[in-house]
Image (tube, rainbow, N blue to C red):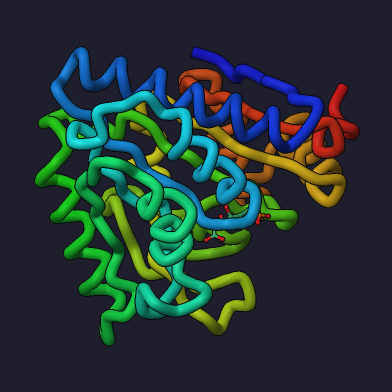
């Protein structure tokens, strides 16, 4: 495997490339295993992809199971909810309903919600426990999903989903962990904007420092099939 860097000139082209890639991976999984399990990301850049995917997927959505890479500790109706964003940007526009595994961000005990989610995932993944694809964003601090710099979640070696501190260290999140993400058959990072150029350079070309740049755990692992989709602004700092 290796890192595939796929620059796009505009964010529209970036969203179209990401949409096509997810659909290719979904069709591959459906052909091989009868269904596709794809983990989606929150954030403004991944959000660009969802309306395009809804319009162009060309998928039998009844054979797709949508999971989440992370969720905020809020109800699904909250403005910060990743589920709420995906509902509005993707699910509301589909002609057939995929099964959706929603992380219960509203749960009063997030640790229980994390354990429940891991159980839900085990119920849909094959014995090999592999997501067919994971869509991820990259934060300006080098986080991905809700795996933030210095978080104890970075050290999780077994559980597939944990409760974790948010970006400010006070709010809390639910997040998939690297043991599960590293087993995904395919990973797509969607990165756009000049504000990501410096962190992307550090992640790809800087010293390996996964505690401070957690996304390196995936983007610097040549054993994984990682596709980095980015626009010209985010690519400005790359060799
Ligand atoms: C979230 C995401 C997070 C996001 C990155 C990139 O819940 O916010 O899971 O990991 O993908 O922070 O977000 P932007 O593309 O908006 O910078």
29 up-or-down from 79: above or below:
above
In the rendered image, which quarter contains the C terminus? top right
189 lies left or right of 232: left
111 lies left or right of 63: right
Residue 74 image point, x, y percent = 41, 79
Instruction: Find residue 95 and report its image quarter.
Output: top left
160 up-or-down from 2: above or below:
below
125, 76: nearer the viewer: 76
Residue 22 image point, x, y percent = 44, 28
**Residue 106 seen by the camera:** yes
89, 217: nearer the viewer: 89
**Residue 177 seen by the camera:** no
Instruction: Find residue 197 and report its image quarter.
Output: top right
Q: Residue at x 60, y 25 (%)?
A: 17
Q: Residue at x 27, y 65 (%)?
A: 114
7 lies left or right of 1: right
Q: Residue at x 68, y 44 (%)?
A: 209
Residue 83 image point, x, y percent = 39, 62
Q: Quadrant of ligand 1?
A: bottom right
112, 91: nearer the viewer: 91
Instruction: Find residue 35 and report its image quarter.
Output: top left
Q: Farthest residue toward the front? A: 95
38 up-or-down from 31: above or below:
below
Numbered-mark total: 0
80 lies left or right of 4: left
Q: Residue at x 14, y 41 (%)?
A: 124
């Amino acid at each position: 495997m290796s890192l595939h860097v796929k620059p796009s000139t505009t964010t529209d082209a970036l969203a179209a490339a990401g949409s096509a890639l997810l659909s290719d991976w979904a069709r591959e999984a459906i052909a091989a295993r009868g269904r596709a399990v794809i983990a989606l990301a929150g954030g403004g850049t991944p959000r660009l992809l969802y309306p395009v995917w809804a319009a162009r997927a060309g998928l039998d959505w009844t054979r797709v199971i949508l999971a989440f890479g992370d969720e905020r500790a809020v109800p699904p109706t909250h403005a910060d909810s990743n589920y709420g964003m995906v509902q509005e940007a993707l699910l509301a526009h589909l002609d057939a309903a995929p099964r959706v595994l929603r992380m219960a961000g509203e749960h009063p005990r997030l640790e229980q919600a994390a354990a429940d989610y891991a159980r839900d995932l085990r119920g849909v993944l094959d014995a090999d426990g592999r997501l067919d694809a994971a869509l991820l964003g990259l934060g300006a601090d080098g986080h991905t999903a809700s795996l933030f710099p210095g978080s104890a979640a970075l050290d999780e070696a077994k559980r597939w989903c944990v409760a974790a501190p948010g970006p400010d260290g006070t709010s809390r999140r639910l997040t998939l962990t690297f043991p599960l993400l590293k087993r995904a058959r395919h990973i797509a990072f969607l990165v756009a904007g000049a504000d990501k150029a410096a962190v992307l350079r550090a992640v790809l070309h800087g010293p390996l420092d996964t505690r401070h740049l957690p996304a390196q755990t995936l983007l610097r692992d040549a054993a994984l099939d990682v596709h980095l989709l980015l626009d010209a602004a985010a690519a400005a700092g790359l060799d």
